[in-house]
Amino acid sequence: MNTDPRESLMEASRQFYQLGWMAGTAGNLSARVEDGSFWITASGKQKGKLVADDFVRVSLTGELLETPNPENKPSAETSIHQAIYSCFAEARACYHVHSVEAKLVTNFVEGEKLPLPPIEMLKGLGVWEENPQVFMPVFHNHLQVPKIAQEISDRFHRETPQVPALLIRNHGVTVWANSAAEAENHVELAEYIFRYIVAARQVGIKF
Ligand SMILES: CSC[C@@H](O)[C@@H](O)C(=O)COP(=O)(O)O
Ligand SMILES: [Zn+2]
């Protein structure tokens, strides 16, 4: 991967903002560099107009390594990115967005996983089966973000998720991939699936 992925992160953020998935300051994006550290959006930046100074570089253990602007603080959800990179050594990018549909679908289930419809788009998330039975992990939206990160880490060490994506209840989706381009693709596919789930419910289709 390119040593400085910020251009890809800014481009993805602009795109997600335009789609309504990173309204205001919502969401955070990160991508790793060769030494294992990662660039992540600084906390509280407007996601529709990020510039290269709106990022920080942190280590896998959360230590601040580089900040173009001394006032930058790492995203409040950095610990979730750390958990993902620690669980999946091959992951090179981790994107988190806040669409309306990603929040809605978490209200359709009470348990820890959301059943996904057996639609073609699942192939883009790595599921190549006929009529697959696939679930996306759902986590409680604890006020203390490190607690969410710990639960992600604990669950994923016990059980590998079927898709490279997770939901936080009434909050949003987080995806990961082995490149920034693939992470962007995963966000778009996950969001398509959430729109499908909402629409299927409206017309009474069950899966
Ligand atoms: C619009 S506030 C949303 C935040 O609480 C959080 O969930 C979020 O996604 C952005 O936090 P940030 O610290 O800017 O990375
Ligand atoms: Zn968030």
Image (tube, rainbow, N blue to C red):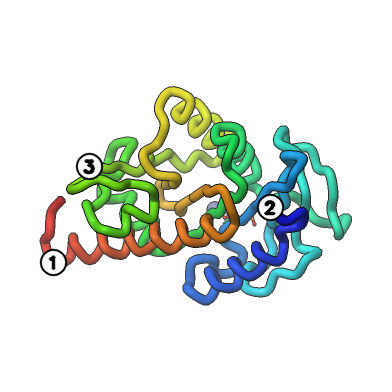
101 in relation to 20, above or below: above
Ligand 1 - quadrant of the structure image: bottom right
The number of callouts visible is 3
Residue that carries the numbered disc 3 in the rendered image? 133
Give the mark nearer the N terminus: 3 vs 2: 2
Q: Is residue 108 above or below residue 191?
A: above
Discs 1/2, front: 2
Identify the secondary structure beneath mark 1: loop
Looking at the rendered structure, which numbered label has been put on residue 146?
A: none
Mark 1 Cβ inside 8 Å of ligand 2: no
Tell me, for residue 1, which label it has, or none: 2
Instruction: Indicate the secondary structure of the residue bearing disc 2.
Output: loop
Q: Nearer the viewer, residue 44 or 50?
A: 50
Is residue 28 rendered to the left or right of residue 124? right
| Left/right of residue 100 with respect to residue 28 in the rendered view | left
> Farthest residue in the top direction?
158
Kindly report which numbered mark, 3 or 1, lies closer to the viewer in this rendering.
Answer: 3
Q: Find residue 67 and report its horizontal and vertical position in percent.
A: 84, 53
**Position of residue 21 measured from the top left corner of the image (x, y, whole percent):** 49, 66
Horizontal and vertical percent position of residue 121: 31, 59
CB under 8 Å between discs 3 and 2 = no
Q: Residues within 10 Å of mark 2 (few under 14, many from 20)?
A: few
Q: Residue at x 61, y 43 (%)?
A: 81
Report which residue position mark 1 lands on. Answer: 203
Q: Is residue 113 left or right of residue 91?
A: left
The amino acid type found where label 2 is placed reads: Met
Q: CA distance from mark 1 to mark 2?
A: 43 Å
Q: Amino acid at mark 1?
A: Val
Against 17, is 189 above or below?
above
* Mark 3 surroundings within 10 Å by alpha-carbon count, few (fewer than 14), some (14 through 19), many (20 or more): few
